[in-house]
Image (cartoon, grey):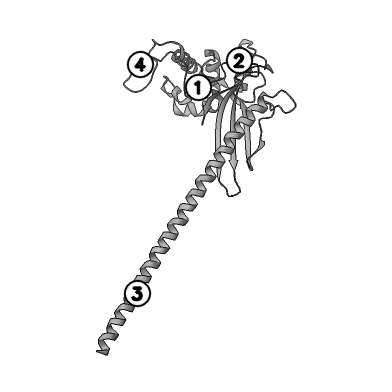
Amino acid sequence: MRVAVRSRKGFALLAVLWTMALLAVIVTRLAAAAHTETRIAVNLRRAAEMREAADGAVHVAALHVLDRSEHHWNPHATPGPHLVQENGTEVEVWLRDESDLIDINSAPPEMLATALVIVGLEPPKAEQVAAALVAWRMSPTLPVAQLPGRAYAPPGEAFRDIDEILMVHGMTRDLLDKLAPHLTLYSAEPPASGTRDMLAAATLRRLHAQTGYEPPPRLRDRAQVVRVVATARGEDGAGFTRTAILRLDPATVSAPLTILQWN
């Protein structure tokens, strides 16, 4: 009888120990899950804070570019870095005046051909590609597309994306990679004198030598198209970069800021 009682007590003790072990495992798993979820929540909150700080810095930069006092930021003369404090987060801001670049939507064929020669095309081929680029944005009847087995007319409208240039006959990925950092879609004017962009400057010099072309002067109070790159970083290494292209017109008091691109 005593043996049976001891056996039952031993079994009960073993069951209690197994239950406690199981509960310990469950509690450990729950604690680990809670810790992971807490870290995820903290990271999401931090990412949102970084995004908010970068977005705020873009608008601060726009105000400084529009400002004509001593607080003015000149994208051409002082592109950066500019440091902005947003809600306790430091944001590094760089500016680029899009008028420093070659506008693929408005550049004349001789400017495009000259740029293409500088990046490596032979002059006859450069003239063909330049003509195809102009036809793409202006002539909805000429079949200048290059996809294999397909000949279709260009849309007869402005390029909406730099990579869209790849669809033009004669354009290659290697050629576009050389051109893309020096192109814009938004300035609607030729590069201004004193441009800081190397390809645009070389193109202007060669055009001047060949044809006497003179770039337009850079007017202080004109509407500007500015690329703003704002990078927010926290002490924990978290970061976020906002790239925006803004049209800024100090003469339009009611709506001096237009967002053209927000990436």
The residue tagged 2 is 207
Q: CA distance from mark 1 to mark 3?
A: 83 Å
Q: Earlier in the sequence, mark 1 or mark 4?
A: 1
SS at circle 2: helix
Q: Residue at x 65, y 27 (%)?
A: 63
Of residue 76 and residue 116, the one placed in the foreground of this image is: 76
Q: Earlier in the sequence, mark 2 or mark 4?
A: 4
Q: Earlier in the sequence, mark 1 or mark 2?
A: 1
Q: CA distance from mark 2 to mark 4?
A: 32 Å
In the image, is residue 240 above or below residue 161? below
Q: Are marks 1 and 4 in contact (CB under 8 Å)?
A: no
SS at circle 1: loop
> Dividing the picture into quarters, in which one does residue 3 lie?
bottom left
**132 left or right, relative to 22:** right
Q: Earlier in the sequence, mark 1 or mark 3?
A: 3
Q: CA distance from mark 3 to mark 4?
A: 79 Å
Q: Are marks 2 and 3 in contact (CB under 8 Å)?
A: no
Q: Residue at x 41, y 59 (%)?
A: 30
**Residue 152 numbered tag:** 4
The amino acid type, in three-letter code, at marker 4 is Tyr
Q: Are marks 1 and 2 in contact (CB under 8 Å)?
A: no
Neighbor class of circle 4 (other Cα within 10 Å; few <14, some 14-19, many 20+) is few
Q: CA distance from mark 1 to mark 2?
A: 16 Å
Of residue 131 and residue 100, the one placed in the foreground of this image is: 100
The residue tagged 1 is 121
**Residue 16 numbered tag:** 3
Q: CA distance from mark 2 to mark 3?
A: 90 Å
